[in-house]
Image (cartoon, helix red, strand yellow):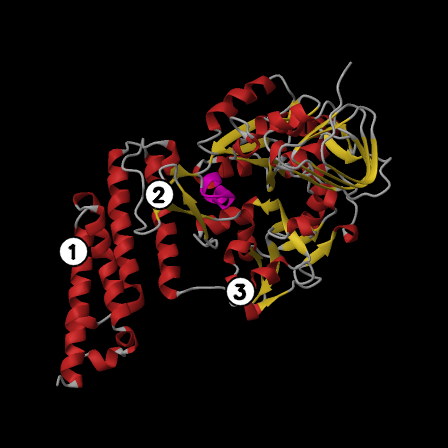
Amino acid sequence: MISGKTQRWDYIACISLALHVGKLCTRLSPRSLSIDLYKLFTLLPSFVFNLFPHMANLSVNRMRQHPHTLSNIDFQGASYAVAAKSVKLELDLLKKAADDRKFQNQMDAFYMLVTRFLNDRAKGTKIDWDKIKSPSAEQIIKYRDIPEANTTGDLEKLAVLKLNGGLGTTMGCVGPKSAIEVRDGMTFLDLSVRQIEYLNKTHGVDVPFILMNSFNTDDETKHIVKKYEDHNITIRTFNQSKYPRIRKDTYLPIPRSPDAPIEQWYPPGHGDIYESLHHSGLLDELLADGKEYLFVSNVDNLGATVDLNILHYMIEENSDFIMEVTDKTRADIKGGTLIDYDGTMRLLEIAQVPEQHVEDFKSIKKFHIFNTNNIWINLRALKHLLDQDAMELEIIVNNKRTSAGEDVIQLETAIGAAIKHFNNARGINVPRSRFLPVKSTSDLFLITSNLYKLVHGQLTMNPKRMFQNAPLVKLGDEFKKVNNFLNRFKAIPNILELDHLTVTGDVTFGPDVDLRGTVIIVANHGEHIDIPSGAVLENKVVTGSLRILDH
């Protein structure tokens, strides 16, 4: 029989072996090993600790007899430490192969993001659901309680930025999403430029218009903005970071060289705005030009226009950060929300929510507001935080699968997560009219309808609409791509009296159709429905087949 003491030193010897193998792995480039062998080396420490879990609980005091083997060992995190060192080796090889200081800085920043991610994994860091509280009335201000601005002088200190990193692929379009035509032959970008141009002309100011592009959108966007050179607007662009995707099993970067295929890289979410704005030099340029406040929004949110009342409130209340929120509906259950966490206001995204609390997160009763991603930032406060290296945003793990079928991870951050770092930060509960995103053709259906009027690039609710809320519209997969959507409507129906519309299957609409109340149209597989010209559907369910022939 083996004594307990002898057995314990066998355990120690096994753990020591595992750690030495892990250290050996960090000295070898993963490229010099087969991927399977590399996985074995990096996961061996974790395997040993799982085999002898009670060893992780042995105190350092009980092991002082062998300090060379066990001192300063984080049993739970040893395999993650090995992974972090291996990632650094790979990133150093990428940096060495690139004669580009900007790229090298990005790889350094990415390494810091990876180490934070691995550290969180090692510690098992998770949000404590019991600490979550609803924000107080002092933290979330109602828009109607904000005084009306009686001066436009604040605009001299303002710059406007649109997040322009996304593609239009989900709607079947090629190129930047901002280049999709959405209303009266104008694109998202056209509408935004028209809004700022009108603002500058009306108030005699020069509010610069900034686009944060990604490597996916930068080239085409720079070409597009040339058409605005004769407009009364200053346009600036800069790029957000370009980070390597990492393997889900080893956490190693996918790219093997700086010029690896585009699909091996990713833009790391809009939380990257702070570092990218800083490293591009644009933050310092804006401050030098007297611009102290920045209004940021998604380029596809057509309701995100400059609001003088919010800007004036921010200045008067010395608030360094304002997030616009609005009341949550059943269509917004996945949107991030503001919470009070240990006395600090924080952004909570669904990706951070423990699985057992996801339904609570989606509840309209528990979390009745959500983030519109309309953000107002004090640039001097931002500069101070960045100079102090004091900004650390929660990491969002985005699991993806490549076209080759490989499981990868993208580590991302959200712009709103910075709210916890700013002094006197506030949320403002704004009307729904300030949140008009176009994420799908269902949204496009609303934006292109007579529900809205277009004035100087800004959409406003048609005064003939009895209720100020938009109807709920759900278009099926047959309408998912923009071209299919356009082919199925001869003209967008009149929806001033519509409450709810659901359409699935092979359905087409003639011109001058009027939809009222609740309308549900379902064409089952193999069936086709033509809604004829001039049809009026009020509180109707249409199923089966209906084909109208021209003659």
From the top left corner, tell me how far across and down residue 460 is, in percent.
77, 35
Q: Which residue is mark 2?
A: 406
Residue drawn at x 56%, y 71% as measured from the top left: 130
For mark 3, give the secondary structure.
helix
How many discs appear? Answer: 3
Q: In the image, is 523 to the left or to the right of 227?
A: right
Q: Mark 3 or mark 2, which has the lower sequence index?
A: 3
Q: Residues within 10 Å of mark 2 (few under 14, many from 20)?
A: few
Q: Is residue 210 above or below residue 268?
A: above
- Of labels 1 and 3, the one closer to you: 3
Q: Residues within 10 Å of mark 3 (few under 14, many from 20)?
A: few
For the residues marked 1 and 3, what is the alpha-carbon distance in whole angstroms?
Answer: 40 Å
- Of labels 2 and 1, the one closer to you: 2
The residue type indicated by label 1 comes to Leu
Q: Which residues are magenta?
A: 268-277
Q: Nearer the viewer, residue 175 or 550?
A: 550
The residue type indicated by label 3 comes to Gln
Residue drawn at x 59%, y 46% as measured from the top left: 377
Q: Which residue is mark 1?
A: 24
Q: Nearer the viewer, residue 301 or 209?
A: 301
For mark 2, give the secondary structure.
loop
Q: Mark 2 or mark 1, which has the lower sequence index?
A: 1
From the top left corner, tell me how far across and down residue 292 is, in percent.
59, 42
Q: Which mark is residue 494?
A: none
Is 291 magenta? The answer is no
